[in-house]
Image: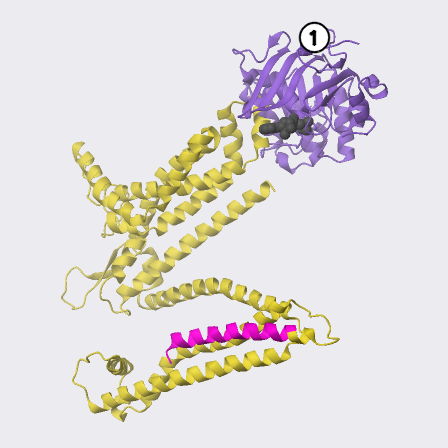
Chain colours: A yellow, B purple
Amino acid sequence: MTPSFLIILLLALSVFGYHAGRRRALSVAGEADAPKLHSRPVYYGILTALWCGIPAMILFVFWLAFEPAIITNIVVAEFPAEIKNLQESRLNLVINDVKNLVEGNIVSSETKTWLQSAADHYKDLQVVSKAALAVIALSLAIICALVVWRKISPQLRARNHVERIFKYFLIACSTFAIFTTIGIVLSVLFEAVRFFKVIPITDFLFGLDWSPQMAIRADQVGSSGAFGAIPVFMGTLMISAIAMLVAAPLGLMAAIYLSEYADIKIRAVVKPLLEILAGIPTVVYGFFAALTVAPFIRNTGSLIGMDVSSESALAAGLVMGIMIIPFVSSLSDDVINAVPQSMRDGSYALGATNSETIKQVVIPAALPGIVGGILLAVSRAIGETMIVVMAAGLTANLTLNPLKTVTTVTVQIVTLLVGDQEFDSPKTLAAFALGLMLFIVTLVLNIIALFVVRKYREQYE
Amino acid sequence: METNESTGQKGFQTVGETKVENPRMTCRDVNVYYGDKHAIKHVGIDIGRNQVIAMIGPSGCGKSTFIRCLNRMNDTIPRCRVTGEILLDDTNIYDRDIDVVPLRAQVGMVFQKPNPFPKSIYDNVAYGPRIHGLAQNKAELDEYVETSLKRAGLWEEVKDRLDHSGTSLSGGQQQRLCIARTIAVSPEVILMDEPCSALDPIATAKIEGLIDELRTHYTIVIVTHSMQQAARVSQRTAYFHMGDLVEVGITDKVFTNPRHKLTEDYITGRFG
Ligand SMILES: Nc1ncnc2c1ncn2[C@@H]1O[C@H](COP(=O)(O)OP(=O)(O)O)[C@@H](O)[C@H]1O
Ligand SMILES: [Mg+2]
C-alpha cells in the first residue's frame, strides 16, 4: 500500500467516523428520558473524526521520518565485518551505493554479491515497513475512533473537546514558525562555531583582509586564505548607505506629498504605482543595475575624466535605493496618516500654513515612526542579495570611494557556497560566520525599529 | 419681535435679537454645504464685543460647522462650501483677497478634545508667536509664553516644568494649555467647540471661570451641549436646530422665557 493511498484511506475513515459519531449522538439523545445533549450533534461527529484521523496521521509522519534510518541500521548490521569497521565517511559511501542499487541506479564499481544482497534486504525491509505502517495506522485509527464512539453520551462535552483540539492545532502552527526560526539560527550558529575553531573570532571580526581562497597545495600563489570581515562589512555598509541616501529622502518626500498634498484622485493612482515598485522581483532590479545604471555611471565618469569601475558600489547602491523607496514611503505614509487630524487643526487654527504645519507638527510627531520605518528599510538593504550579486563586485576592497568595486556580505556568502564545495573547509564555513553576523546585525536593527515604532503608537492611544 | 431680514427669502425666521450694537463679527445669510448636504441655512447673527456667546442645540444641528466658518477652518474640509458674508470688524473674511493665515491668528480656536502638540509646554505656547515672528528674541518669547500661561491660569502649575511634554499634563491642564497657545498669538476672538466635553467637573469649573475672565480681553464664541454651562458663562445664547438658527437672545431671557416653541422644547428637555 503506497503512503498516498493510506492517507486517502485514513481520510475516508475519518469521514465515516464523523457520520458514525453524529448518528450515535442522535440515537443516544433519542432514547427515552435521556438528558439533553451537551453539544450539537455535529461536534460529536467532528470529535470522532478527529480522534480517528489525528493519532494515525501523527504515527504516519513519525514512521516516515524514522523509517530510513532504522532500515539502514539493520542493513549495516549485516555488512561483512571488514566493511562495518570502515571509517565513517567510507561507510557512508557504501550505504549510498546500497541505496542507489535499491533505487535501480547504476553503481560506480561493479556490483559485489554482498552489496547486492544488502540492497535486496533493504528492499524487503521497505516493503515490510510499508505494510506494517498501513496495518498499525489503520488499526490505530479504528481503535481510537471506536473508543470515542463508545464514550459518546449526552454528558460528553464534545464541543469543548473539539475546541481544545483546534486550539492545540493553532498553537502548533504558530510554534512551527518559531521553531523553524530557532532551528535556522542554531544551524547557522553551529557551523559558525566550527569556523571560529579554525579562524579565531578576533581575526574574523577585526581583520582588514578578505581573500577566502585557501591554498590547496603549498606552492600555490595568491591564495592566502585571509578571513578579515571588515572589508566585506564596509562594502555592505557603503552600498546600504548609498541606498538609504536615495531611499530615505525620496520615500519620505513621496509620503509627505501623498498624505498631505495629493488630492484623492492622484493618491489613488500614485500609491498603487509605488507599491507595484515593491513587487518587482529583485533580480529584475539586478539587470537594471548591471546593464543600465552601471554602464551609464561609468560612461558619465569617463566623460568627466573620472575612473569608475564597471561594477561600482554607486550603481548597486542607487538601484537598491530605488528598490527600497516604496518600502520607506508606504511605512512613512502610514505613520504620517496616523498623526491625528486634530494636531493639524490645532496648528491651522493658530494661523500656520500647510508647510509650517507639516514641518513643525506632523513630521516631528511622526518622526519616531519614520525612523522606525527607515531602520526596517536599512535592514532590508543590508540583507538584499540579488541586486548586489548582479551589480556589485567580488573583490573585497577596503575603500570609501563609491566609484570603486566593493563586495558585500551577501555576495560573499553566495560565492562561497555556490559550486562544488566540501562543507568543512574554512572557506565554506566562513559563509556561515558571515551569515550569523548579518543575522545579528539585522536582528538588532529590527528590534530597535519595532521598539521605536511601538513606542510611537502608544503615544496616540 | 425683531426678525432677520436676510432670511426673508425662505420660510424660516430667526426669533430674538440677532443684532447688537457695535458688533465684533457680523454674519449675513451664511450657508454651508458639505457636497449636496445643506448643513447651515441662511444664518444671520452678530457677535458682540467682549461678550461670551453660547451656541446650543441638539447634536448634528450644525453648531461646529457654524463656528468653524468664523475662522475659515472649514477650508480644510475638501467638499465643504460656504456662501454669504462674515465680517470681522468691517472686513469680509470670505473676500477673495483675504489671507486665512493672519485671519486665524485673529480668530483663534480651541477644540473639543485637547490637542496639545507632542512638544514641550513651552514650545506649545511659543508655536504661534514663532510662526508669526512676533518675538524679536528669546526674552520676548519667554514673555509671550509667561503672559499667555498666566492668562490661561496655568502658569503656577507648570512654571517649573516648561520643558515637560504638553501631552504629559492632565486633560484639564491640556485644555488650558491649548487656550494659552491660542492666546499667545493675541487673537481678538476665541472660538471654543465644546471645550469641556472631555473634562471632569472640577476641570470644567476651572475652564468656565477662565472663560469669564478672558471676556475682558477677548470676544468668545462657545459651543456647548450643556445648557447649565451656557447659562453660567454666556451673555447671549443662540439656539440651532437642523441647520437653522432658531432663536438668539440674552442668555437669561432665552433660558427663562424662550420665545420659540423649538427652543422651549429643547430647554425643558423635551427634545435633544
Ligand atoms: N466633514 C463633513 N462632511 C460631511 N458632512 C458633515 C461633515 N461635518 C459635519 N457634517 C454634517 O453636518 C451636520 C452638522 O454637523 P456638526 O456641525 O458637526 O453638528 P454639531 O456640532 O452641532 O453636532 C451633521 O449632519 C453632520 O453629519
Ligand atoms: Mg460638534
Residue drawn at point x = 55 percent, y = 11 percent? B95
Q: A70 or A61: which is nearer to us? A: A61
Residue drawn at point x = 49 percent, y = 29 percent? A359
Q: Give the range drawn in magenta.
A: A1-26
Residue drawn at point x = 39 percent, y = 74 percent? A4
Q: Determine if residue A392 is in view.
A: no
Q: Where is residue A142 in the image (x, y as percent from the top left)?
A: 52, 81
A70 displayed left or right of B11: left
A109 displayed left or right of A351: left
| Quadrant containing the C terminus of chain A in the rendered view | top right
| Quadrant containing the N terminus of chain A in the rendered view | bottom left
Which amino acid, mark 1? Glu
- What is the count of numbered marks? 1
- Let me know if residue A8 is in the magenta part: yes
Chain letter of mark 1 equals B
Provide the major secondary structure of the magenta segment: helix
Where disc 1 sits, the SS reads helix
Q: In which quarter of the image is residue A417?
A: bottom left
B168 displayed left or right of A254: right
Q: Position of residue B5 (x, y in %)?
A: 70, 8
Q: Where is residue A224 in the image (x, y as percent from the top left)?
A: 21, 61
Q: A102 or A323: which is nearer to us? A: A102
Q: A375 or A289: which is nearer to us? A: A289
Most extreme residue toward the right is: B256
Q: Determine if residue A295 is in view.
A: yes
- Let me know if residue A86 is in the magenta part: no
The crowding category of the residue bearing disc 1, from other C-alpha atoms within 10 Å (few below 14, some 14 to 19, many at least 20), is few
Q: A430 or A230: which is nearer to us? A: A430
Q: Name the residue under label 1.
A: B5
